[in-house]
Amino acid sequence: MHVYEVFIKKDGRDEFRHVGALEAANDDLALVLARESYLRRAEGDRMWVVRRDHVVAAADDFVEPNADKPHRHHDGAAVAARRKAARQSQG
């Protein structure tokens, strides 16, 4: 048995969204189970079913350098707080 992650989207500009996971013996069965579980009420027009062991996941230390970039926040509050702290520490 393999674990599969299921993504669906409505036609148009909406992006694919993760809707859940399921276990299946093979890819074909995973597609059928995903359709019957997640598209029963026409929640989406397109579907991706991805085996979890085929997903490439980044390690925490790979993502960490991007965690401290307050200049990318649009409200400016984090940058202002950092500048204020720097001015206070300089005297």
Image: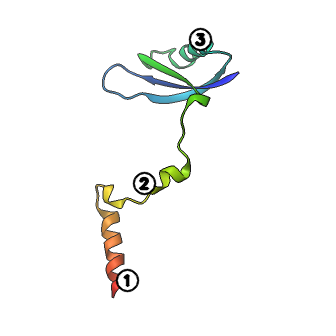
In the figure, residue 69 lies in which quadrant? bottom left
Q: Nearer the viewer, residue 81 or 53?
A: 53
Q: Which of 35 and 90 is in front in this view?
A: 90
Q: Which residue lies furthest to the right in this view?
A: 1
Is the residue marked by circle 3 packed among few (<14), some (14-19), or many (20+) residues within 10 Å?
A: few
Q: Residue at x 59, y 11 (%)?
A: 28
Where disc 2 sits, the SS reads helix
Is the residue marked by circle 1 packed among few (<14), some (14-19), or many (20+) residues within 10 Å?
A: few
Q: Which residue is drawn at 32% across and 76% down?
A: 84
Q: Where is residue 13 in the image (x, y as percent from the top left)?
A: 30, 26
Q: How far apart are marks 1 and 3 (CA)?
A: 62 Å
Circle number at residue 89 = 1
Q: Nearer the viewer, residue 29 or 45?
A: 29
Circles 1 and 3: CB atoms closer than 8 Å? no
Residue located beneath label 3 in the image: 28
Q: In this view, does 4 lie above or below 90?
A: above
In the figure, residue 55 lies in which quadrant? top right
Q: Is residue 63 above or below residue 32?
A: below
Pick the quarter of the image with the C terminus: bottom left
Where disc 1 sits, the SS reads helix
Residue located beneath label 2 in the image: 66
The disc, 1 or 3, on the residue closer to the chain's N-terminal end is: 3
Q: How far apart are marks 3 and 2 (CA)?
A: 38 Å
Is the residue marked by circle 2 packed among few (<14), some (14-19), or many (20+) residues within 10 Å?
A: few
